[in-house]
Image (tube, rainbow, N blue to C red):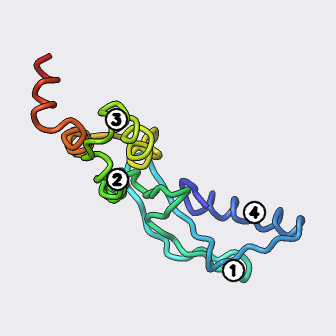
């Protein structure tokens, strides 16, 4: 559950509990957590919220659809995770990217269809600082160096 203050969380959770009960579902308090998010970054921790006989734990971050959401909208951790996952993907296709049997165009297509989507998943919500932009550029340059080789990269820059 998300909300700007504990009262909103209580109201939304109450609605969730009522509607779930009406359609025959039960909310599991072990799996249901809540987070308070603010625009100014000032967050007062409340611990657990009790609604009826259920108690819900407050969290500072959680995974949603594979992306980490934090209460202060900090994307540094998510970008770091995406680059790590991208590295794992890169190393799984590294032999293909360095193969002399494949054309450079095919290697670029592998990069665009296999590696980039893994790294850029959820990037629409990222707030990039220069540091994060730099880290993403370093990762992409590593992949492109593997595809084109050091000499090929210099030729492309000059040409």
Cα distance in 3D space between marks 2 and 1:
48 Å
Identify the secondary structure beneath mark 3.
helix
x then y, percent, for residue 70: 43, 58
Of callouts 3 and 4, the N-terminal one: 4
Which of pointers 2 and 1 indicates the residue nearer the eye? 2
Quadrant containing the N terminus in the rendered view: bottom right
Residue 108: mark in rendering? 3
Mark positioned earlier in the residue sequence (2 or 1): 1
Q: Residue at x 15, y 30 (%)?
A: 152
> Could you classify mark 3 by the number of other residues whose Cα lies within 10 Å: few (under 14), some (14-19), or many (20 or more)?
some
Q: Earlier in the sequence, mark 2 or mark 4?
A: 4
* Residue that lies at the very extreme toward the top in this rendered image: 159
Q: Residue furthest front?
A: 101
User: Mark 1 highlights which residue?
Assistant: 54
Q: Residue 133 at what x, y percent from top left?
A: 25, 39
Cβ–Cβ below 8 Å for labels 2 and 1? Answer: no
The correct choice, above or below, for 157 with respect to 45 in the image is above
């Amino acid at each position: 559950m998300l909300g700007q203050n504990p009262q909103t969380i209580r109201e939304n959770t109450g609605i969730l509990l009522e509607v779930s009960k009406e359609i025959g579902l039960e909310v599991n308090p072990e799996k249901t957590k809540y987070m308070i998010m603010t625009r100014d970054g000032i967050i007062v921790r409340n611990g657990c919220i009790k609604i009826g006989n259920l108690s819900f734990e407050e969290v500072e971050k959680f995974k949603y659809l594979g992306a980490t959401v934090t209460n202060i909208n900090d994307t540094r951790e998510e970008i770091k995770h995406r680059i790590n996952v991208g590295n794992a993907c890169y190393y799984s296709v590294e032999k293909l990217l360095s193969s002399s049997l494949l054309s450079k165009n095919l290697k670029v297509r592998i990069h665009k269809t296999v590696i980039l989507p893994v790294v850029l998943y959820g990037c629409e919500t990222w707030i990039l600082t220069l540091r994060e932009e730099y880290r993403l550029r370093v990762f992409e340059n590593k992949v492109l160096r593997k595809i084109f080789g050091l000499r090929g990269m210099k030729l492309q820059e000059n040409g």
